[in-house]
């Protein structure tokens, strides 16, 4: 029968309409049906293959315990904030979402996450977390996230290169002056092995800002005063920037040495012997040059003055519950499962961080991590939980890039930075 | 009306008034059919171009963060942008990228096309090789060039260091970052525009070239006085489309340098992206989009005027 001659009976038209209506209804009510089938979703950021495989296994275990089917979503760190933002705006955020340090206040302040204070108050494990890390998941007095691991920074060295200039692992620097003196010893101009011994952490993200932030804290500085005004141009800020810039001015660091995000980091390549970094440096060596890993040693976080208190910063990554979840109780079950003693240690191990729980301070995987990284945790503070920190840290990073290239005086750079940050916060 | 009864539109208007209603009806039906046939495309254009443009203009007058309803702020976003030195720096970067890429690129494209038109061996194979980068996405090309330009493990720096010239920090030295991106972009686009110019060169009348040859003109003279003036319109088209595309550069900068170092490769579109997805300022990003749109319109009119064929002048 040709199409031209085709006839549709009333019954077939009705059947077609019924099928269409059923399809439409299925589309509309699918989420509700899936919710009845105990369906959840989780978004993780920056997992490698090993972490993804482990996460699938953990979610299967969760299903066996609770009956929930969990969809695993992933994103790289680079585009994570954009993905979370657009998901929050379109109401498609995962029920449970991983988030980085600066994303928490940026998204929590805009209502993207559910507060979890009541649930934390009723949960037996709450007091097992390091209080500072738990505090880092709060915004405006309310808790929005549970920490799973911390990226704790400290001074990191290449012990084999230090030995070349007669410095043993038992004589690592503890203050800025000692750190600088070691860099001078390692420089070719003083007979050492390196052109530029100190790697500033500069990368295509905000690595330079992270190094400056540690120096700022070591100089007993902060980003904001009590009223929320930016105070980077205050005396500690000036001191930190002058110290950072001095490495470049004295030829102890190369302003154009930038880690592009893949392959061995400069210290693993042997192009530098000192940096401010975390256990990530060791993980990078294990991945790219295993023979170098044994030489990556963590020293104590520095203090600006001899005999002063060591200070550093930890970047704390967490999980929170999306505000659009249809099943807050199920989402909490999943969140508390991931943040439990057994699972969170594995997250910390696979994501290359240190545990966020006190009862995991002796987790088996830490046997392979230099104890210096673990011990640095006690000196770690967090960045301020400001809603515009994502934007602010980029401005700080750009200003630092300009400063280390000597394109302006430090005082002018910091004053301009304060003005920009205050404008961002006022907008 | 023709003898066979077929109406001829407009041929007998006024002469035979009795035929008018039929002709008029046919015209009306043809117009209606045309409108119906055009309507899907028109609707698609309205939905995908006109409506977003109008929405962008509306949002540019608001304070909007995606996660909260927009609030009317009038021209405040435009004022803030014009006061921002990073905007002017990004505009300068954008224009310098577009001018240098197209300015150098168009000369290279014409020369390579001319060589392919008669002097290079293995024409089809070579043309395919030159065209190949166009087949890869900018992201892939940028990642490959990241490796090529790497100061530690990249082959280019390895070669330079072998002759004591390196390393050059192509992507992390502010002086080198933008030129490196220009070269990479030119390499990627060369094949596409070369094919267009080559097609134009192939269409240059051979009798003109032969006549010139008989008159004693050498290859360079024939190219300069006959081929180039003949394809001038195509070259202008290539220059305009390439330039306008270059004004929207984003991917290379995002993948290779993240806009750095020290904003050296931050373009208007990159700044727009940052405003929208880092600063959550959709209104300001839309205001930049409107300004870029106006810039593109103005520059395209200027380029059309400057590169118009000479006969239009007369």
Image (cartoon, coloured by chain):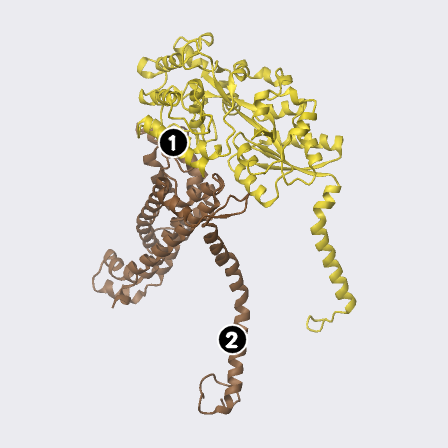
Chain colours: A yellow, B brown
Residue A256 lies, in percent from the top left, at: 36, 29
* Image location of residue A119, percent across then percent down: 68, 29
Name the foreground residue: A32 vs A387.
A387
Residue A89, picture quadrant: top right
Query: Where A366 falls versus B144 (above or below)?
Result: above
Q: In terms of secondary structure, where does tag 2 sit?
A: helix
Chain letter of the residue beneath label 2 in the structure image: B
User: Is the N terminus of chain A in the top left, top right, bottom left or bottom right quadrant?
Assistant: bottom right
Q: Secondary structure at mark 1?
A: helix
**Label 1 crowding class (10 Å Cα cut-off): few <14, some 14-19, many 20+?**
many
- The reply, left or right, for residue B300 in relation to residue A142 is left
Location of the C terminus of chain A by quadrant is top left
Q: Is residue B189 above or below residue A107?
A: below
Picture coordinates of residue A415, whole percent (x, y): 35, 29
Give the residue pinned by disc 2: B31
What is the x, y in percent for residue A339? 65, 26
Q: Residue furthest left?
A: B216
Q: Which residue is mark 1?
A: A417
Q: Chain of mark 1?
A: A
User: Taking A293 as reference, is B105 above or below it?
Assistant: below
Badge 2 and badge 1 both on one subunit = no
| Count of marks placed on residues | 2
C-alpha distance separating marks 2 and 1: 63 Å
């Amino acid at each position: 029968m040709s199409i031209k001659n085709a006839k549709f009976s009333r019954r077939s038209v009705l059947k077609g309409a019924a099928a269409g209506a059923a399809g439409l209804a299925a589309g509309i009510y699918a989420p509700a049906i899936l919710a009845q089938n105990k369906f959840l979703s989780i978004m993780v950021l920056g997992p490698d293959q090993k972490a993804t495989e482990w996460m699938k296994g953990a979610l299967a275990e969760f299903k066996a315990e609770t009956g929930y089917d969990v969809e695993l979503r992933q994103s790289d760190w680079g585009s994570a904030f954009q993905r979370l933002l657009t998901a929050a705006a379109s109401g498609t955020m995962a029920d449970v979402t991983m988030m980085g340090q600066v994303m928490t206040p940026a998204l929590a302040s805009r209502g993207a996450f559910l507060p979890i204070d009541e649930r934390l108050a009723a949960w037996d494990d709450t007091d097992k977390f390091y209080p500072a890390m738990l505090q880092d998941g709060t915004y405006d007095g309310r808790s929005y996230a549970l920490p799973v691991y911390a990226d704790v920074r400290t001074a990191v060295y290449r012990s084999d290169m230090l030995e070349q200039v007669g410095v043993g692992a038992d004589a690592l620097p503890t203050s800025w002056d000692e750190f600088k003196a070691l860099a001078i010893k390692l420089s070719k101009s003083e007979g050492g092995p390196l052109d530029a011994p100190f790697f500033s952490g500069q990368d295509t993200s905000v690595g330079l800002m992270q190094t400056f932030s540690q120096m700022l804290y070591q100089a007993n500085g902060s980003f904001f005063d009590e009223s929320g005004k930016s105070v980077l141009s205050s005396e500690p800020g000036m001191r930190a920037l002058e110290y950072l810039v001095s490495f470049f001015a004295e030829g102890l660091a190369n302003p154009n040495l930038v880690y592009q995000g893949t392959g061995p980091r400069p210290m693993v390549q042997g192009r530098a012997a000192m940096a401010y970094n975390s256990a990530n440096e060791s993980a990078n060596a294990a991945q790219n040059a295993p023979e170098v890993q044994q030489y990556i040693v963590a020293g104590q976080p520095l203090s600006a003055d001899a005999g002063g208190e060591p200070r550093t910063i930890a970047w704390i990554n967490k999980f929170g519950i999306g505000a659009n979840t249809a099943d807050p109780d199920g989402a909490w079950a999943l969140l508390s499962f991931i943040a439990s003693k057994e699972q969170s240690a594995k997250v910390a191990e696979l994501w290359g961080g240190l545990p966020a729980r006190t009862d995991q301070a002796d987790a088996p995987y830490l046997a392979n991590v230099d104890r210096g990284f673990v011990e640095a945790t006690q000196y770690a503070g967090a960045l301020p939980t400001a809603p515009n920190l994502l934007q602010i840290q980029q401005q700080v990073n750009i200003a630092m890039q300009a400063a280390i290239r000597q394109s302006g005086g430090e005082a002018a750079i910091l004053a301009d930075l304060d003005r920009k940050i205050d404008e961002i916060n006022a907008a | 009306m023709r003898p066979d009864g077929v109406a001829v539109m407009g041929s007998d208007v006024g002469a035979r008034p009795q035929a008018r209603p039929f002709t008029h009806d046919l015209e009306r039906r043809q117009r209606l059919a045309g409108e119906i046939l055009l309507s899907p495309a028109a609707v698609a254009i309205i939905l995908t171009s006109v409506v977003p443009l109008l929405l962008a203009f509306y949002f540019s007058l608001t304070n909007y963060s995606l996660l909260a309803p927009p609030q009317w702020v009038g021209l405040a976003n435009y004022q803030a942008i014009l006061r921002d030195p990073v905007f002017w720096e990004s505009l300068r970067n954008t224009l310098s990228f577009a001018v240098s890429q197209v300015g150098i690129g168009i000369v290279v494209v014409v020369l390579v096309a001319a060589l392919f038109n008669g002097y290079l061996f293995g024409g089809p194979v070579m043309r395919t090789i030159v065209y190949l980068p166009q087949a890869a996405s900018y992201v892939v090309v940028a990642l490959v060039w990241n490796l090529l330009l790497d100061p530690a493990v990249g082959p280019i720096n390895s070669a330079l260091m072998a002759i004591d010239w390196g390393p050059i920090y192509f992507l992390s030295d502010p002086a080198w970052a933008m030129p490196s991106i220009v070269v990479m972009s030119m390499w990627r686009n060369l094949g596409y525009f070369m094919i267009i110019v080559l097609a134009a060169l192939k269409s240059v009348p051979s009798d003109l070239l032969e006549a010139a040859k008989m008159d004693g003109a050498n290859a360079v003279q024939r190219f300069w006085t006959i081929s180039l003036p003949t394809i001038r319109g195509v070259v202008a088209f290539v220059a305009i489309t390439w330039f306008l595309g270059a004004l929207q550069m984003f991917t290379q900068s995002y993948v290779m340098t993240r806009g750095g170092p020290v904003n050296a490769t931050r373009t208007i579109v990159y700044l727009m992206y940052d405003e929208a997805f880092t600063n959550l300022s959709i209104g300001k990003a839309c205001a930049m989009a409107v300004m870029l749109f106006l810039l593109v319109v103005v520059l395209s009119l200027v380029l059309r005027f400057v590169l118009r064929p000479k006969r239009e002048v007369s």
